[in-house]
Image: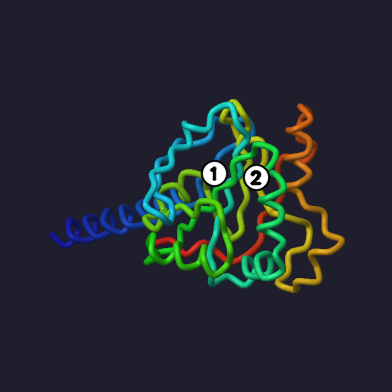
């Protein structure tokens, strides 16, 4: 009887360990360069439904967003992120911010959009489903989807991983670099970089 109890306990421990490993893998799963971009349907700050599939034939930027993250604040307080998005949406690029932060909702994103003068969608992914599908780790974690809806770039927004606004000047902006190449029908010369910023605040 004692052997049975010990064996059963070991099985329970093994099951718990396996579950933790599986969960960790789910949270750190990511998409490869050239792989199909995971489909999604989310609501923006006004409650409008946004489907990735609707943008086939267009270049799409996904910007993982959290207004409480100082790395994100750095790019918005200077006007840099809005200016960058405006430059490329003016050339036909679709730019979508995705807020995967737990306990946020459309009303929160609507207020931030007004306060920060964001005139593009902030999508509500507070369940974390889309963030996990893409393997989003940081805010801002950037992804660029090509016209055929494959992943063309993923990683950092630029080469200076700091919260100091003055570091924007002189940094290599990887997103701008990749977009310029794609818009010129050239391959992305640096399709993957290491993302930096705050960790995405998943619901679980």
Q: Which residue is mark 2?
A: 154
**Looking at the image, which residue is at 53% across and 64% down?**
66
CA neighbours of label 2 inside 10 A, class few (<14), some (14 to 19), many (20+): many
Q: Which residue is mark 1?
A: 30
Q: Position of residue 126 (x, y in %)?
A: 39, 58
Q: Which residue is at the far right?
A: 170
Task: State the SS at label 1.
Answer: loop
Q: Residue 112, relative to residue 149: is it above or below?
A: below
Residue 169 located left or right of residue 87: right
Tag count: 2
Q: Which residue is at the far left?
A: 1
Q: Position of residue 75 (x, y in %)?
A: 68, 64
Task: State the SS at label 2.
Answer: strand
Q: Position of residue 69 (x, y in %)?
A: 57, 70
Q: Give the mark toward the camera: 2 or 1.
A: 2
Viewer-proximal residue, 129 or 2? 129
**Looking at the image, which residue is at 71% across and 56% down?**
83
- Do the CB atoms of the residues marked 2 and 1 lie less than 8 Å apart? yes
Viewer-proximal residue, 166 or 24? 166
Query: Disc 2 versus disc 1: distance between alpha carbons?
Result: 10 Å
Q: Which mark is residue 46?
A: none
**Looking at the image, which residue is at 73% across and 69% down?**
162
Q: Residue 17, relative to residue 143: is it above or below?
A: below
Examine the image and state in which quarter residue 150 appears.
top right
Q: Earlier in the sequence, mark 2 or mark 1?
A: 1
Q: Residue 30, relative to residue 102: is it above or below?
A: above
């Amino acid at each position: 009887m004692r052997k049975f109890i010990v064996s059963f306990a070991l099985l329970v421990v093994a099951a718990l360990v396996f579950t933790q490993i599986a969960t960790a893998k789910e949270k750190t799963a990511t998409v490869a360069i050239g792989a199909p971009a995971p489909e999604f349907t989310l609501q923006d700050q006004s409650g409008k439904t946004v489907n990735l599939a609707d943008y086939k034939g267009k270049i799409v930027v996904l910007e993982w967003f959290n207004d409480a993250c100082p790395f994100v604040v750095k790019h918005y307080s200077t006007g840099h992120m809005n200016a960058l998005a405006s430059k490329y949406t003016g050339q036909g690029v679709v730019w979508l911010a995705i807020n995967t932060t737990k306990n946020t909702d459309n009303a929160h994103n609507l207020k931030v959009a007004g306060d920060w003068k964001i005139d593009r969608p902030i999508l509500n992914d507070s369940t974390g489903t889309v963030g996990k599908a893409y393997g989003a780790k940081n805010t801002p974690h950037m992804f660029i989807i090509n016209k055929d809806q494959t992943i063309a770039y993923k990683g950092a927004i630029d080469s200076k991983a700091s919260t100091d606004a003055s570091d924007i000047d002189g940094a290599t902006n990887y997103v701008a670099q990749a977009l310029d190449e794609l818009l010129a029908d050239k391959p992305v010369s640096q399709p993957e970089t290491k993302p930096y910023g705050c960790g995405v605040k998943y619901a679980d």
